[in-house]
Image (tube, grey):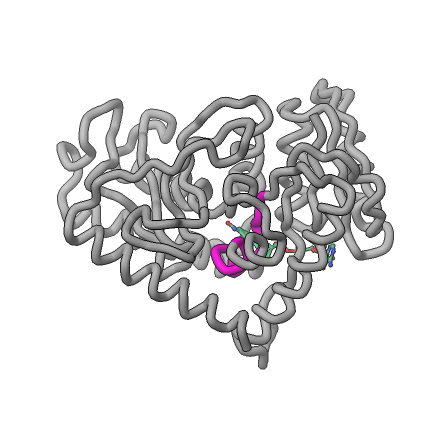
Amino acid sequence: MKVTIVGAGNVGASCADVISYRGIASEVVLLDIKEGFAEGKAMDIMQCATNTGFNTQLTGVTNDYSKTANSDVVVITSGIPRKPGMTREELIGINAGIVKSVTENILAHSPNTIIVVVSNPMDTMTYLALKSTGLPKNRIIGMGGALDSSRFKYYLSKALDKPANDVSAMVIGGHGDTTMIPLTRLASYNGIPVSEFLSQEELDKVAADTMVGGATLTGLLGTSAWYAPGASVAYLVDSILNNQKKMIACSVFLEGEYGQSDICIGVPCIIGKNGIEEIVDITLNDAEKGLFSKSADAVRSMNDALKS
Ligand code: NAI
């Protein structure tokens, strides 16, 4: 199985590292526009192989899409972060241009691939990738909910003082500080609702910490995080390549589900060899429905910036 990762920066390289180390794919191509950068990252990771014992063949290339041919999955992490003096619309414009040209180049060499969009603003970039390529919706998946859910589980495990792997929880909605919706009502510790162990005040704090989870790390690191984002992409890619049918919150094109249409936003999905195998339309309560509708409005107004 072959995976291409476009963008060999922090998230792309971290993702290549986890995919290689865990043997999720037999072949990984890391591509970047910066001369020699992907080659360097790939060489560094490949020099771990004998000490960590993996057999994945990882190659780095500078903008040579012929080397990405016949990829089963392509991950797009290429893009620029916002710089001082830039408006959000300007950032969307630049990243939209990058995502559009990258998807064209990718599809020229891997017409049947499944595309995982990571570049921000992720829900809008996923929508753009879907509209500009015309691919069926099962083949364009936005990664955000997997990361936000893992952060939610981390904060729940801290509050419960129990292992994160014993916690089950999901974040839906837009992938943004104010648009994501940690579903505290449905979170559980070994099958028992977390509300049995945590007060409403504690649950509200967990949800608030989750929502600013990315910003907290940016404050500490001086740049956005990469280990958890890279591992979250690898988790998603594993479910596709190995047809695991895991339920993962992903940004996907909605056509009536959750009362929304013509938008890509995070909802629970079954992820397997065809990409999005199924959108799981769970019943939200009135408060959650209200939050989802507000989140969709915010994502839609971000999408509007694509038109300008
Ligand atoms: P980074 O700056 O470390 O890496 C981006 C890489 O993309 C750079 O190496 C750059 O040379 C490359 N690049 C730029 N234009 C390109 C092009 N046309 N073709 C090929 N490569 C190109 O950034 P980082 O931290 O890796 O983040 C990447 C993106 O992922 C950002 O947009 C970031 O906001 C987003 N992100 C999304 C997350 C999510 O959950 N969806 C989580 C974390 C980051």
Return the x and y of residue 151 as percentages of the image width and height. Answer: 40, 43
Q: Is residue 108 left or right of residue 80?
A: right
Number of labels in the image equals 0
Residue 97 in which image quadrant: bottom right
Query: Residue at image x 47%, y 47%?
Result: 144
Along the line of sight, which residue is nearer the eye, 122 or 307?
307
Residue 224 visible somewhere in the drawing = no
Question: Is residue 266 shown in magenta?
Answer: no
Q: Is residue 203 left or right of residue 36?
A: left
Residue 284 visible somewhere in the drawing = yes
Q: Which residues are magenta?
A: 116-126
Return the x and y of residue 218 as percentages of the image width and height. Answer: 51, 58
Along the line of sight, which residue is nearer the eye, 198 or 134?
134
Along the line of sight, which residue is nearer the eye, 136 or 305?
136
Query: Residue at image x 51%, y 28%?
Result: 272
Q: Is residue 296 left or right of residue 290?
A: right
Q: Is residue 53 left or right of residue 240?
A: right
Query: Residue at image x 65%, y 36%?
Result: 73
Residue 250 in which image quadrant: top left
- Residue reaching furthest bottom? 85
